[in-house]
Image (spheres, rainbow, N blue to C red):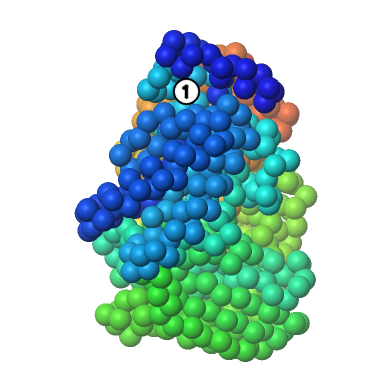
Amino acid sequence: MSADHLARSLDLDAATGVRRFAAFAFADVVGYTILMATEEGRTHRRWMAALDGILRPLAGTHDGRIVKSTGDGVLAEFRTPAGALAWALDVQTRLAAADGAEPEAPTLALRIALHMGEITATDHDIYGAGVNLAARLQEHAPAGGVLMSTDVHAAVAARLPRPARDLGLIVLKHLADPERAFVLDPEVPPARLPSPPDVSPLPSLAVLPLRNLGGDPQDDYFADGVVEDIVVSLGNLRELMVVSRSSTLAWRGRDADPREVSRALGVRYVVSGSVRRAGRDLRVQIELSDAQTGTRLWGDRAEATGGELFVLQDRIVERIVAGVAPHVRAAELQRALRKRPESFTAYDLTLRGLSLIHDLDRERFTEARALFGRAMAHDPGFALPTAWAARWHSIYVGQGWSPNPRIDMEEAAALSARAIELDRQNALALATCAHVRSFLMHDYDAALVFFERALSVGPNNALAWLLSSATLSYVGRTEEAIRHAEHGLRLSPFDQNLFSYYNLLAIAHYCHGNIAEALRWCRLSDAETPRFTSNLRVLIAALVAAGQESDARHAAQRLLQLEPAFSLAEYERSRMPYRDPKIRARVLADLRAAGLPE
């Protein structure tokens, strides 16, 4: 709808309760519950002053109105999306300017989200699906910033004071489909946000990718991956709750505010830093922050050449643990530290392979296997590339790409067993071995034993939790499967491999009979990576189970385009992983009903 049309539609009397199009905004006070619990009187006074002195007058200035106050926020309506944007920016600017009036008090900061669409309007309220969507979008807005739906962003793009940050598709509470959103981050983030409580009884921590200061974009993969050993070593400690490395890639290349990371990931401590690489020479700078207090606990700067990097990583791990969990015993820390490679080249090749393996572009995926092979040749005693090579063969078979699945199954089994021989404390190797035994070899009992070992040595390993969920689904332990998948996603909510995580949640819910939930997670996985054939199979079955056979047949055609040789007979004989007979029969019946070839 054009801005002129929207303006004319808002000329209707708001008391009639008629349907019309509008632009609207949700604004919410950050940490309002905490502020009221600690300083109720002052918080109420400051919020009323902001509402009456800033939000209401500015709404009138920009041809809008405050529809209602919700106690800790407001719903506002505007003639045009441009007016809504101007109001939001002016409000945030005025609040930021007023922040210095009480320097000892927490900042009174707002999260604002903008959307536009058809509503039902009265004098005192507006209703509609779009209003509900805006309320959910607001939960993802940054403190002091403005979030825009796709429609609003398209309508006001020419009026933005600076480029908006694309958040991609985000999952919204109680809404079936993800939504794309754009954010204008505050130029100066709020200074003293109220501190939320820990979501975990353990000290919780995230390690951000090191910013690549070398100037060569080809080194981005190295800046992403150089913290891998730090994350895994910390994740092996039961005294810490550590978010996976993959999930922190959302902050790649950004000078992130630790408080933003804390709110997004639910952690108290944030490790950040930079790396400058010139050949084999490295300069690493790293610091640990308490994101709830804004305190920088310590910083470390060091230079390393080649293999000396691994000694430096060990020292960083020890420093973090000393700052976050000083009660951790030295013996436990030593046990947690990963076995290091002898070859720096092998380490570098492994990181390059990791940057490609989750991209289901067949050519790039094939290149990842070659990189893992070269890493194993450079250092035959290094477990990491061996474990990931086993994982590669598992995905290769699952995608239907392997010309000889039996050979690839045997290769995956041999590589995963070899990885465990090289490092019996490597959670990735143990989880990969377990998944291969389950998914490819259908040896479920042995797989569950290996998963138990993987989760024992790597309690924070997100992939181990997710892969164990799949095996639990296969054997019919579906409630456990859902819990394991949800915990894995909690450990890595922004993982670069989210399409797989969402798919495993979909499998767990489908097997449990939660068809609506299975469809929701299938669609999220499909939105991330439409080439993932494992997800398409679950999507087809769930659509049939939901009575949406036309959509199921369309999804079946997509599967056949990606895997032209697919047949139900071959799938049942060699790749169908379900042991529970009821689940197995239901999957086959649903796939058959979608018209897939026998």
Q: Secondary structure at mark 1?
A: helix
Q: Is residue 554 above or below residue 35?
A: above
Q: Percent position (x, y) of residue 183?
A: 58, 47
Residue closer to the observer: 139 or 379 = 139
Q: Is residue 191 above or below residue 547?
A: below
Amino acid type of the residue tagged 1 in the rendering: Ala
Q: Is residue 110 above or below residue 336?
A: above
Query: Could one spot residue 138 in this view of the protein?
Result: no
Q: Quadrant of residue 571?
A: top right
Residue closer to the observer: 363 or 52 = 52
Residue closer to the observer: 283 or 397 = 283
Q: Residue at x 75, y 57 (%)?
A: 367
Residue closer to the observer: 342 or 352 = 352
In the rendered image, which quarter contains the C terminus?
top right
Residue 193 placement, left or right of 378:
left
Q: Residue at x 68, y 22 (%)?
A: 4
Q: Quadrant of residue 553?
A: top right
Q: Percent position (x, y) of residue 61?
A: 54, 37
Q: Percent position (x, y) of residue 499?
A: 56, 43
Q: Residue at x 29, y 59 (%)?
A: 197
Sort mark 1 into few (<14), some (14-19) or many (20+) by Cα contacts within 10 Å. few
Instruction: Name the residue carrying label 1.
Output: 129
Q: Residue at x 62, y 89 (%)?
A: 303
Query: Could one spot residue 107 in this view of the protein?
Result: yes
Q: Percent position (x, y) of residue 227?
A: 55, 72
